[in-house]
Image (tube, helix red, strand yellow):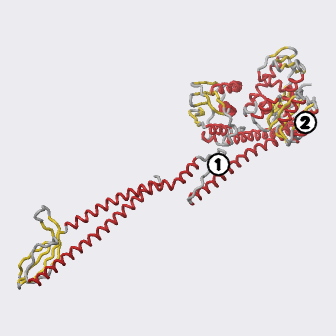
Amino acid sequence: MKLLTRTSLYYLLLSTFLFALGGMVFYLFLKHDLDEDFTENIYLEKEYVEQFVEDSLRLPLTELQTGIALSFEETNAAFEEVLSDTALLMPWEEELQPFRQLVFGIEVNEQWYAATLSSPMYESDDLIEKISWSLAVIAVVMLFVLFFLTRWLSKRMWRPFFKTLNTLKSFDLNSKDVPEFSEERISEFKTLNNELQHLTTRISTDYRNLKEFTENASHEIQTPLAIIRAKLELLIQNNNLSQEQMKLVQESFETTNRLSKLNQSLLLLSKIENRQFHETTTVNLVAAIENKLEQLAELMAFKKLRVEKKFHAQPELLMNAHLADILLSNLLSNAIKHNIEQGEISIQITSDALIIANTGRNLETDPQKMFERFQKNNSSQDAVGLGLAIVKQICDVNGFAIAYTIEAGRHRMEVRY
Amino acid sequence: MKILVVEDEKELSASIVAFLKKEGYLCETAADFYVGDEKAGMNEYDCALVDITLPGGTGLDIVRSIKKLQPKTGIIIISAKNSLDDKIVGLDLGADDYITKPFHLAELNSRIKSVLRRRNFEGNKEVVLGQLRILPEAQEVFVNEKSIVLTKKEFALLLFFVANKNRVLTKESIAEHLWGEEADMADSFDFIYSHIKNLRKKLMEGGHEDMIQSVYGMGYKFSAT
């Protein structure tokens, strides 16, 4: 739910409640006042009648100018006056109408009369009804106005916020530039933007420093590694080493080689991450695969692997040629390396996907986890465990999706482009 | 043969020199751009190994001055950067080859030999070693003047062995020589073994004495007198 919808809803509910309450109070006050007015008027008439009787010693005319009906009835003695509300049938109307009646005793020439003053109240009801209606109309109009006003105001007031939100959305850690948050006049938004500016700048700098560190570290390690390797190679050429010493040298040499490979892979990973391979060309996938297969042909023949090619399309990928080479090289050499003797490799190319499937031993880990760095199947001790991480990284920077599944002893790598 | 090694890492430079001296080369070293540029311009070397990142300047500038002042000198660029750009620029400038750190000394040796061969023996680019005569350009091998047929990989292997005769070649350096650095074939050692077995068989069938020995499971050695 949008913030605006929610605030509008709250406004609407609150205003409706307040209007209903106000209307009710207004109605009660009005009714009370009118009520008092009626009673007062009736008593004024009574005073008039009594005054008239005292002055002229006869009953007044039953026609009064105030619209209050007056009637007399002979009675035997004096009695307590009674004020009551009653309903009477008017001769010209079908329905019963509300009246206020005052019955009181009055003596004229020693004869007691019961005087009845009847004041119609339907006019007051009419009035209340009319007033209530106009009030309701005003309320509805006000609500509408209020509703649209708040919407408009909110939209206007929240505009800087949405601007900030959009700027934030465009923030990409991998892109070199930090988003620029605008200068606002409203202090809350100003603080928000300043803080965000500060935060994004710092995150970007930290991230870049970290990446640079990885790259620099890998880069700087290259030279000492080269030296160690060269020294060991010199040592290997020494004819005076015993077999035991030679074994030690050999193990050091192998470990150094592993370290060197690991380091090169890390360097490559951070370079891909830092998007240093930005030059793109169109890579014909089928041609690239054929080329790679030719390079690996001997190795596949050595393992007696059967290759099945199904090229349904000739997709042209816009990407860095070097990365494309590494991607295919890693995928295919994996399919060879982890294959079994006399196994199979099937390569399928469609207009939107490259699928490489191969026979092989079962994995001990979750296939998807193999894309993580330093994840490797326990059986292959020599591997560094970065090959698939590099594959994943190349797919990521090019916007490809990669999935690794195992079905019926077949390892299936699918790259969607 | 005179070789100039322009490399700022003294230890690496010393190792290269130690390895190359056994080949009978005369080596001179330079540890920064200025010395390297001066030496390369003043003397005629058969081959210069030039590191790209040097204190004081870029090795590419040294390549430029060698091409201008000593065009007969063969040039191999050494770089820690595995960057395609450097490679292309370096080769465009006229460098003969390009090698990336970390490299195997045997690989460097074989590259130097190939550069020297291409530069020095004009019209006579053959390698003779005992009963062997190899024509690298034509990819032909003769044992006692009888031609034997080798596959591409076997031929590359033989040339690598001959360039590094009497040295122990590690399996790693052979793998890298045959498949390059990118082909990370951890289990390709078996494959190398089968290649070497075949090569040995073909040479011996051609009447060559057995010269390739395995060294403690570490590598192989081509012995020649």
Q: Quadrant of the C terminus of chain B?
A: top right
Horizontal arrangement in the rendering, residue A10 relative to residue A34 (left or right): right
Give the class, few, some or many, for how many residues have Cα within 10 Å of label 2's Cα (few <14, many ≥20): many
Please, which chain is the residue tagged with disc 1 on?
A: A
User: Residue A202, image x and y in percent?
Assistant: 66, 53
Horizontal arrangement in the rendering, residue B103 relative to residue A28 (left or right): right
- The image quarter containing residue A98 is bottom left
What's the mark number on residue A149? Answer: none
- The image quarter containing residue A176 is top right
Q: Which residue is mark 1?
A: A178
Horizontal arrangement in the rendering, residue A47 relative to residue B169 (left or right): left
Question: Which residue is nearer to you in this view: A409 or A68?
Answer: A68
What's the mark number on residue B17? Answer: 2
Question: Which residue is nearer to you in this view: A188 or A43?
Answer: A43
Residue A330 appears anywhere in the view: no
Q: Residue at x 76, y 36 (%)?
A: B82
